[in-house]
Image (cartoon, helix red, strand yellow):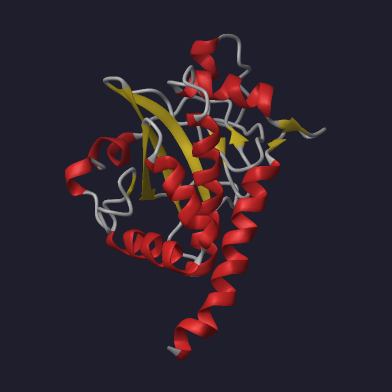
Amino acid sequence: MNSPFPTHARVTWQRSFGRRRPVLSPARATAPIARRSRVTLLGAALTCGLTCASAQPAAAQGDGSTFLRVRSTNASIATVLRQASEQSATFRRLVETINASDGTVYVEEGKCGQGVRACLVTVTMAGAHRNLWVKVDTGVADVDQMGSIGHELQHAIEVLSDRTVTSGATMYFFYLKKGSRSQTGTFETRAAVQAGEAVRTEVRKDRPRAQAR
């Protein structure tokens, strides 16, 4: 299993085991890209562990006709996915774009660290198809979850747009080239930030109408 690569529209170097570990080769560049509306690249190798191993298609929950390639084994996350799709046109567009791709995105409960609410962890291969793994903090308001997941789905679309991105290492180099790097060593993608903000705005606007129905 490739090491996780958390992302969020911004990429930030982080410490591992109390000290920085330089990326010297693609094999060691399998560090995570963590996320908060940003992509955080961790400079240490991690493992997906049980989350990546257990989230299998047969266990995915939600509306099968809508969420063909965006899935979760977590019932509360599956509910958030469904509600976000109902209340946000941007979220529906993101899901539809992934449905038309060669990849499947698994959204599971997990902590990304550094105050980050969600992160794109890594990419793995399943035959000719790619699996992308997103972790999300379920301990926040559902509107924030929807925006954070929407942000990560945009990152997933960015990754899926390049067929050469098939692992955590290649995802790192993808964002090294495509991300906007700041003086603090972080990368940001405007599209991901805008997607997350749009989802939150649309959900908040839809809530009064939904309650009045």
Q: Residue furthest bottom?
A: 212
Image location of residue 208, percent across then percent down: 54, 85
Tell me what residue is drawn at x 42 percent, y 88 percent. 213
The picture quadrant where one finds residue 85 is bottom left
- Seen in the picture, residue 129 relative to 132 is either above or below; the reply is above
Q: Indicate left or right for 67 with 89 as reference.
A: left
Q: Quadrant of the N terminus?
A: top left
Residue 130 as seen in the image, left or right of residue 116: left
In this picture, residue 184 sits left or right of residue 204 = right
Can the viewer see residue 111? Answer: no
- Left or right, 141 with respect to 55, comes to right
Q: Position of residue 28 (x, y in %)?
A: 52, 15
> Which of the two residues, 164 or 184, is positioned nearer the viewer here?
164
* Depth order, front residue of 195/183: 195
Q: Looking at the image, which residue is at 70% across and 43% down? A: 190
Residue 201 vs residue 20, the one in the foreground: 201
Does the image show residue 174?
yes
Q: Residue at x 50, y 56 (%)?
A: 91
